[in-house]
Amino acid sequence: MKRNRMKILNLPIFFVVLMFLLSNVGIIRVKANNLTPVEINGQLKVSGSKLLNSNNQPIQLKGMSSFGIQYSPQFVNYNTMKYLRDNWGMNVFRVAMYTDGDGGYIFNKAACKAKVEEAVNAAQKLGIYVIVDWHMFNNPQTDKSQSKDFFNQISSEYKNSPNVIYEIANEPCGDVTWGRDIKPYANEVIPVIRANSPNAIVIVGSPTWSQSVLDPANDPLSFSNVMYACHFYAGTHGQWLRDRITQALNKNIALFATEWGTSDCNGSGGTYIEESQRWVDFMTQNKISWTNWVLDDANATASILKPGSNPNGGWTDNDLTESGKFVKAAMLQNNTPTTGGNTTPTTGGNTTPTTGGNTTPTTGGNTTPTTGGNTTPTTGGNTTPTTGGNTTPTTGGNTTPTTGGNTTPTTGAVIDTSKTYKIISSSTGKVLNVRNYSSQSGAQIEELVDVGALSEQWKIADSGNGSYKITSALSNLSLDGGVSTEGTDVKQYQYAGAENQQWNIEKINANTYKITNKKSNLALETTGVYDSADIQLWNYTGKGTQQWIISDVNAGTNTTPTTGGNTTPTTGGNTTPTTGSAIDNSKTYKIISQNTGKVLNVRNYSSESGAQIEELVDVGALSEEWKITNSGNGSYKITSALSNFSLDAGTSTEGSDVKQYQYTGAESQQWNIEKIAANTYKITNKKSGLALNGTGAWDGSNLQLAKYSSTADQQWILKAVN
């Protein structure tokens, strides 16, 4: 629409000036409310780490991703996209076209292409940007020829469309590297697109479900107008990934969060409002464009709609999930809907924190989608939170362990300043930790499962007037309340005697304390039940997330590993089989990654057949212990001490997830264990010869099969439990 121009030439000059002054504030807003995003911004381009519009102004796109168009096609239509544009301020829509699986493009080309065209045509009419997503997993080289053919057709059909963006590799994972697989793939596919659409933005994924963004940052593609995908889920990915993204941006590559969720990376768990808010703020600060996962009504946390919602829009807040309400507010923040609709964001456009911003996920947080498998997110099997809020049972119940019998100062006793303590959340059983086991000034304080690291231990010394300083046993830096306002992150800094570094510790019952900042009187609070939840300051309300057990480290028998925390405790005199000796069938073992120090675990501490095997920090759970018995011909079966099910490699092809099933004697359930160093083994599947392979350094990363390449994530320490 064009604005009507007012004839003002014959008006008195003072009236002209008056009209200008009265209307000037609204000029941009009126224009924004009557022109579409594409009319305003035109053909986009990339400059350094920024996405720019046609006027060379940095721009942040915000929108939704569809679920797989073969699974939930009903939500991918003009009416829904228009409603999201007009009422949520959406200016970009991602069309997720799964390439394989039931009904994917490889098996159903005509129907999938037609749905993509419907979405692109709708986006053109609405004047919004649209991402055509080749929604693949594993190695992009697998279907490269079909990818080139598809993108040739689409880029030719829409060669004159400034609003079409191409995402050519959603989430590479498994035995995939940037230099060997993804970059060569992109070097073939991008020229196909550029032959038809020379100025189009192209987005390329990176290894590990598009989280290894430093790989392309260190070895970028040579094409112009290329961005790189970064994917995250608030319950699984925290500050460590934001730090990695910051490093990549500093290397001058542009990133687009084409998929992110408020849940764990499997689409369930949460909703993690606080961590989601940190991510939204981070993306806003760095002008990282995003599309949220997912526009769907499946019974999963990540879905923005409740089951049965209208597939044509028109939703009320009663139709929205907690994730939907949050994402709507995040999209409206600093954004005005384009044409009509509700132009006022809720609460002034601020994304939603409830009651101080510290919402607590529901118990455990890990609800499982039930809608026929259609709720699986695109994270390619990267399906587990960082212990996701599952407070870990210590064999024999879900009560919080007291870490080896450590005692808490008795009622009325002063804290013994000669001792070192663990500060344990009464709510989660996790302990205060310095993020990344850091000795650096300014490092974030978080909660983490107790792994015995020195960064989880604290000296509490009298600072005068009844207050204390709380100092890391690792770094000798002290807890600091910063600006000491609600929501302030607690970090570690050199002690300077300031009141924001002093803490009042008040016993509220026989075994529990509240810890408040002397400067602000705000309470130390954990912001979630998952590992790496930030510790912040909030007004004290008496909830469990603000109550702490102070436990003497040396009161029990736990030993502490060296700095870094990833080494394995040696309590109990555990021994590793010596060179040449057979594995002792009478013993139970932990199988420890040489790469991460984490142990093999059955996801969600499950006794169910088919449960995924993952890596997890060693928390002493029975699901982390394994019996290794001879299955004949020099091979072994590896059986969970919890469920009595055995490791099973399934189809035994590269990238196969390793799960647990009843032992039947099949070769996919038998394993060759070969010593490759004094304390290290490789474990290969008898059926395929492929190696047991860790797929990431985070808690919950899947165990899969891959060709043996002598990397540390394929090497394992076998440690007898007792």
Image (cartoon, grey):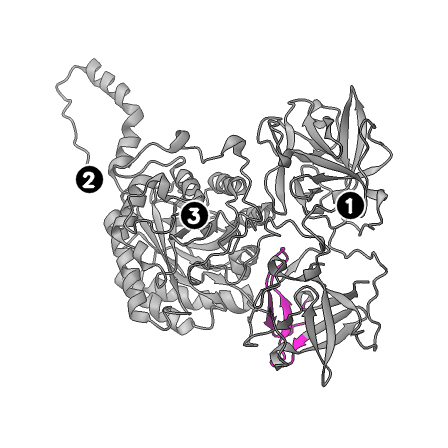
Name the one closer to the observer, 434 or 145: 434
Q: Give the image location of residue 384, x and y in percent.
A: 57, 56
Q: Nearer the viewer, residue 352 or 287?
A: 352
Q: Nearer the viewer, mark 3 or mark 2?
A: 3
Q: Residue sitting at 68 percent across and 44 percent down?
A: 430
Residue type, numbered disc 1? Leu
Q: Is residue 264 left or right of residue 11?
A: right
Q: Amino acid at mark 2?
A: Met
Amino acid identity at mark 3:
Trp
**Range of residues picked out in magenta:** 684-711
Q: Which secondary structure type mostly characterizes the magenta part of the structure?
A: loop
Q: Which residue is depicted at the point 34% across and 44% down?
A: 90
Distance from the alpha carbon under mark 3 to that under mark 2: 27 Å
Q: Quadrant of residue 201?
A: bottom left
Marks 1/3: CA–CA distance: 38 Å
Residue under label 2, please give it: 1
Image quadrant of residue 336? top left
Earlier-in-chain disc, 1 versus 2 = 2
- Sequence-wise first label, 3 or 2: 2
Residue 25 position within the rendered picture, expressed as x and y whole percent measured from the top left: 31, 24
Residue annotated with mark 3? 290
Q: On the rendered structure, is 241 left or right of 11?
A: right
Magenta run includes residue 685: yes
Q: Residue furthest bottom?
A: 633
Q: Which of the two discs, 1 and 3, sits closer to the camera?
A: 1
Which quarter of the figure is the N terminus placed in? Answer: top left
Residue 454 is tagged as 1
Q: Residues under labels 1 and 2: Cα distance?
A: 64 Å
Q: How many marks?
A: 3
Q: Judging from the image, what secondary structure is the residue with disc 2 in? A: loop
Element on which disc 3 rests? strand
